[in-house]
Image (cartoon, helix red, strand yellow):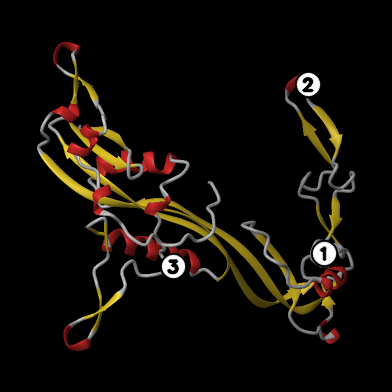
Amino acid sequence: MRIPSELGATASTYDASVMPTRERARALGLVVPVKGWFGRERDLLAEEPERTRQSVEVVVRALLTTRAIREADDEVGASTLVRLRDEHERPTERFVAATWRTLAARVDARTRRPCSSCSFTPGRSTCIGCDGRGVIVIGQGRSQEVRTCPGCSGKKSVACSRCDGAAETVIARVRTHEDRVGELEHVFSSLPEAIRDAVSRHLLAATELDPAFAVDLDRPIVPRETGYRGEVVLETPHLFGIDVTIPLGEARAVLARLAASGTVVDRAQQAHAVPVCVLEYGSHDLALVASSHETMVAVMSAKE
């Protein structure tokens, strides 16, 4: 996934004249060749569609790093305790998942106790690499070879990971820090399913979208206006003359769910509202997708 740039500014106007139409497509010289009877090629745009509908697709690419912190009592060995004491809050590494632990409180030495993980073999635990055999088998049949296990050097056991081989532990209050990276790359749409998939693939494959189509999902698309008797109301969001309440609401809801797993410590996102006109023919759905004020692209999907 491409890491998007920082939050872009909302375009000041969304000119409805940018909305693609069959007439504008033909005026721009766009041709959509399809096979007709006896293999003859014809221009689909030259034919009258059965139905025409206009839409605005909301394309969102986002990365969020959230930090979750939890505390719990844990049984740790002496050397682990030293590491926890030396560990501190880490700065966020941009869009890199990470987990580390720190000491949340001073440790009471009276909690010292025999390690619960190696009570039968104090300080040692069975090597999982060789399953306690001390050797591993490589290959099959005549090429089979028996080698000393590199994990335990043939000793069949390794130092207990909980007590670090000391055979005793203390109970410590440990704080676990976890940076999680959530990503979103999606087109929020109100188009019919068949043409929606084709348009979504096209938009997600686009390297750059026209900056004039940028929207800021953190702010209302339209300003508050004074309504009846001075009441302050919020208009239904319209972009390019199209009601975008549903796709914008879905995009904001998904971003909110991504952020809900912890405190957001880093974020980057891009959101674009791309005008689309869908022409429905007998055997095809044709979408005219605005690429800029002066260009558009034809995306076609065959009906079953």
Distance in Å between CA atoms under marks 2 and 3: 57 Å
Q: Amino acid at mark 3?
A: Ala
Q: Kindly indicate the quadrant of the structure image that contains residue 257.
A: bottom left
Residue 191 position in % (x across, y down): 24, 48
Residue 15 position in % (x across, y down): 28, 54
CA neighbours of label 2 inside 10 A, class few (<14), some (14 to 19), many (20+) = few
CA neighbours of label 3 inside 10 A, class few (<14), some (14 to 19), many (20+) = few
Residue drawn at 42 percent across, 56 percent down? 271
Mark 2 and 3 residues: CB-CB less than 8 Å, in contact?
no
Left or right? Give the position of 132 relative to 68: right
> Mark 1 or mark 2, which has the lower sequence index?
1
Q: Nearer the viewer, residue 178 or 20?
A: 20
> Mark 1 or mark 3, which has the lower sequence index?
1
- Does the rendering let one see residue 48? yes
> Mark 2 or mark 3, which has the lower sequence index?
2
- Does the rendering let one see residue 59? no
**Looking at the picture, does residue 250 appear above or below residue 4?**
below
Q: Kindly indicate the quadrant of the structure image that contains residue 120.
A: bottom right
Residue where numbered disc 3 is placed: 256
Q: Amino acid at mark 1?
A: Phe
SS at badge 3: helix
Residue farthest toward the top in the current orientation of the protein: 38
**Looking at the picture, does residue 173 appear above or below residue 7?**
below
Q: Amino acid at mark 2?
A: Ser
- Can you say which quadrant of the picture contains the C terminus? top left
Residue 207 position in % (x across, y down): 47, 41
Left or right? Give the position of 23 relative to 30: left
Residue where numbered disc 2 is placed: 143
Residue where numbered disc 1 is placed: 120
Distance in Å between CA atoms under marks 1 and 2: 38 Å
